[in-house]
Image (cartoon, helix red, strand yellow):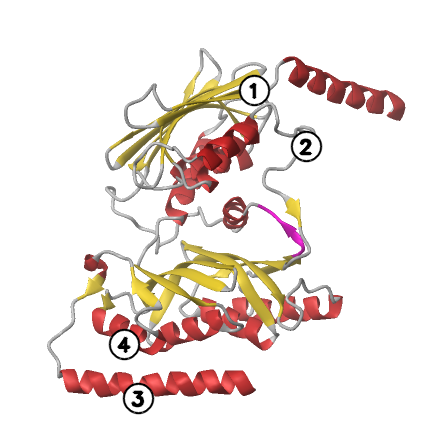
Amino acid sequence: MEMNMSFSHDMGDEYEKFIRRMNPPRVVIDNEACKNATVIRVDCANEHGILLEVVQILTDLNLIINKAYISADGNWFMDVFNVTDQDGNKITDEGILDYITKSRGPESCFTSAMRSVGVKQTMDHTEIELTGSDRPGLLSELSAVLKHLKCNVVNAEVWTHNTRAAAVIQVTDEETGTSITNLERLSRIKELLCNVLKGSNKSSLAKTIVSHSVTHTDRRLHQMMFADRDYEQTGDDVLEDRQRPNVDVVNWYDKDYSVVTIRCKDRPKLLFDTVCTLTDMGYVVFHAKIDTEGPQSYQEYYIRHVDGSPVKSDAERQRVTQCLEAAIKRRVSEGLKLELCTTDRVGLLSDVTRIFRENSLTVSRAEVTTKDGKAVNTFYVRDASGYPVDAKTIEFIRQVIGQTILKVKGSPEDVKSVSQESPTRFLFGGLFKSRSFVNFSLVRSYS
């Protein structure tokens, strides 16, 4: 029996390879067909997850997908995307165009249908995944523990939604600059970070995973928050109707499809977030239409479950709706956007987030990257008490950290205007606190 099963599996793999050899994937890029966008057409053999992979490639290149037409009924997958760069221009960079062509064209490497999107092995760093209850100052506490454990944060992505928090943090050993492999030390890191996540509520759910494998970060964050059931409604998650995404799921019985329509405010990576969620929930997109009109986005998907059935019950329909709403809202950045750009050093994230916490700011989302000795960090901050962020507080923090290092990128309405107070009083307040920051840095250097 085992021989028959193995023989059948081998035959299936050979058949897939034969189909791909006979019908190699093809990518056509056209800068003439549309007046204001580059048109990318992808034709290839169909397999579960292929749509997500294509969207992920375009999203990781920071391209904006304005329109898309998807058809994947049967054994063939055909996609048409209208894309622009971040400034709304056509894509003319030969390096980007060549990368897109090779990533899905005849030169792309196929393994098997078991291939996992965006997964690779690395020994350059250790990856830490964290999920737990959100609270003011959480990122500051976590980064302080990592600093204490002599872990250097090289990359990190932090999301918060619906009272939950998730983070993927890549660290290296402070002394060697490589991944951490000592099992006892890894166990200690997990234990202390888990204690921080639980906080004073030792019964709260918290999870810490340490590994050397790297999954596509955004996809992994969606999976982590989905597993943490952040899509379940709470009393704190009451949005006005005009703010809530409009998600509708109905069955088209004649064709055995479920039709999912989404209307919401457009933003970067929106298509990735919805396709990622449908894929990881086990649904296959057979047809889709994506259209962006000004600030609004319209998405229409014709789906079935991987077992071939449409949505079967009201409970399943409600779950699909809630999960898509959550996927859309997770990346909606609430708060004032601050960008920090400076020379990287061990403990930088801990020092900066400590200053935020001491000035009653909480981080709702963060992106931390380092490259060639430079740190480029983006933070979305809110007042911990729920009030608008005070402009005085932001200006003071910028004086402490450095006005050329930390810049405000958010819209002016996110900041409460400075009240008319004595400029002398504010000047001396900043002066004393700036010195305390210098002293703190010196202690760090010699401790």
Residue bearing mark 4: 396
Which of labels 3 and 2 is toward the front? 3
Amino acid type indicated by mark 3: Phe
Q: CA distance from mark 2 to mark 1?
A: 17 Å
Q: Position of residue 321 (x, y in %)?
A: 41, 36
Residue 173 as seen in the image, left or right of residue 412: right
C-alpha gap between disc 4 and disc 2: 52 Å
Magenta span dominant secondary structure: strand
Circle 2 SS class: loop
- Where does residue 58 sit, x and y in percent of width and height? 46, 35
Residue 82: quarter of image = top left
Q: Earlier along the polypeptide chain: callout 4 or callout 3?
A: 4
The residue that label 3 is drawn on is 432
Task: Give the position of the C terminus as an image quadrant.
Answer: bottom right
Residue topped by disc 2: 114
Compare residues 24 and 9 and report the one nearer the observer.
24
Name which residue type carries label 2: Met
